[in-house]
Image (cartoon, helix red, strand yellow):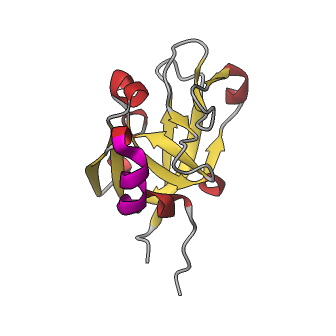
Amino acid sequence: MESELVLHNGDCHCKKVRWKVQAPTSVIAWKFNCFDCSMRGNTYFIVPHQRFELLGDSIQFITTYTFRIHTAKHTFCKFCGITSFYTPWSNLDGIAVTLICLDLGTFSHVEIQNFDGKNSKNFYNQSGIALKSKIHSTK
């Protein structure tokens, strides 16, 4: 069972890309060691796509970068270059929300776990990350 969902607000550095996300007050954030994430120093948590919403005219300020197999959709602000969220290859039905781009005052607990992106297939199967983009029943 998930903890209580609350509304978290986030944005990029220049605030042209703004969004909100419904997520628990206690989350597991993932720090990947793959090439792209390591270079950006990105740590994020994953939510179902349905719980993420772009605000205002943010869509016009977003551009997307893909590489290798072009599965992950790395979105970033056209002006400041910050990736405040993206669609990860590990959860195509979800959104990876960059932790540092959120108002952290809405969290009761954040646990950082390392994700071994260099050995991604084995680690993906063992980590349980695929479940993070699923909406779980509270029954």
Q: Is residue 61 left or right of residue 102?
A: right
Figure quadrant of residue 128: bottom left
- Could you tell me residue 8's position as x and y percent? 48, 48
Figure quadrant of residue 1: bottom left
* Rendered view: 87 above or below 80: below
What residue span does the magenta drawing correspond to?
Answer: 119-127
* Rendered view: 7 above or below 42: below
- Could you tell me residue 44's position as x and y percent? 40, 42
Can residue 123 be seen in the rendering of this structure? Answer: yes
- Residue at 37% across / 40% down in the picture? 117
Q: Is residue 36 left or right of residue 92?
A: left
Q: Is residue 139 magenta?
A: no
- Could you tell me residue 75's position as x and y percent? 59, 28
* Rendered view: 5 above or below 18: below
Mainly helix, strand or loop, the magenta region?
helix
- Residue at 61% across / 49% down in the picture? 92
In front here: 8 or 84?
84
